[in-house]
Image (tube, rainbow, N blue to C red):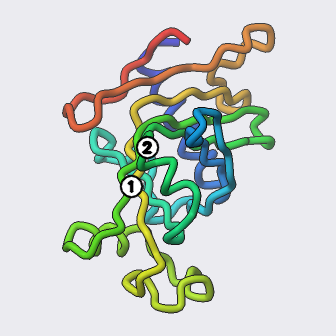
Amino acid sequence: MTTALSAQRALQAVDAAMKRNSFPALITVGVDGSPRARTVNVPGGSSAGTVSSAEANDARIWIGTARGTRKLDELAREPKAALMYNSPPDKGFACIMGRIHVHDGKDGIAAVARERAWRPDFMPFYQGGPHGGQFVALEFVPDRLEVIDYKHKVADDPDGWAPFVLTRIPGSGKPWKAELA
């Protein structure tokens, strides 16, 4: 299989994992330098984003959170993070790594970001809606993907345990590039 075909399959596998699992683990770096993981709600197959869309060079994943959460303090100190999607039906996983931009201000950019991250089913948790003061938008900008997916034949060597890796430079206009794990 060619690297281009493998890369295409890997992107499809990551998108499939995202569509199936709306509750990945978000991993950040704690204030003490140790990893911190928590489940976040990233609606699969919605406006939250995908990694292989037509705008893949500017792929974004939108996450909503509450003001005052631990993750906001952690991201202010270190914006590098990962989203880990477990994919049991395909006997694999997709790990998306990158940087998170926190949009919690009152400016127009933050308002647009909150609209992108907002979903109507968040209303019971954020009474004022996306602009009520408690809702904060996280803009996840991926730069590295690691995926194993036996169903889609991506890094499917049962003895290898090495994921297929794709990297990119966000905003460079260049597509995802396959790399060795």
Q: Position of residue 131 (x, y in %)?
A: 37, 84
Mark 1–mark 2 Cα distance, whole angstroms, equals 16 Å
At 41% from the left and 65% from the top, the residue drawn is 137
Where does label 2 land, which residue? 77
- Residue 22 is labelled as none
- In the rendered view, would you say 37 is above or below 133? above
At 53% from the left and 68% from the top, the residue drawn is 68
At 40% from the left and 24% from the top, the residue drawn is 167
Tally of numbered discs: 2
Q: Nearer the viewer, residue 73 or 178?
A: 73
The amino acid pointed to by label 1 is Glu
Badge 2 crowding class, 10 Å Cα cut-off, few under 14, some 14 to 19, many 20 or more, is few
The image quadrant that residue 141 belongs to is: top left
Query: Which quadrant of the rendered structure holds the C terminus?
Result: top right
Q: Nearer the viewer, residue 107 or 15?
A: 107
At 46% from the left and 22% from the top, the residue drawn is 5
The amino acid pointed to by label 2 is Arg
Q: Secondary structure at mark 2?
A: helix
Query: Which of the marked residues, 1 or 2, is nearer the chain's N terminus?
Result: 2
Where does label 1 land, which residue? 139
Badge 1 crowding class, 10 Å Cα cut-off, few under 14, some 14 to 19, many 20 or more, is many
Q: Secondary structure at mark 1?
A: strand
Q: Position of residue 74 (x, y in %)?
A: 51, 48
- In the rendered view, would you say 124 is above or below 175? below
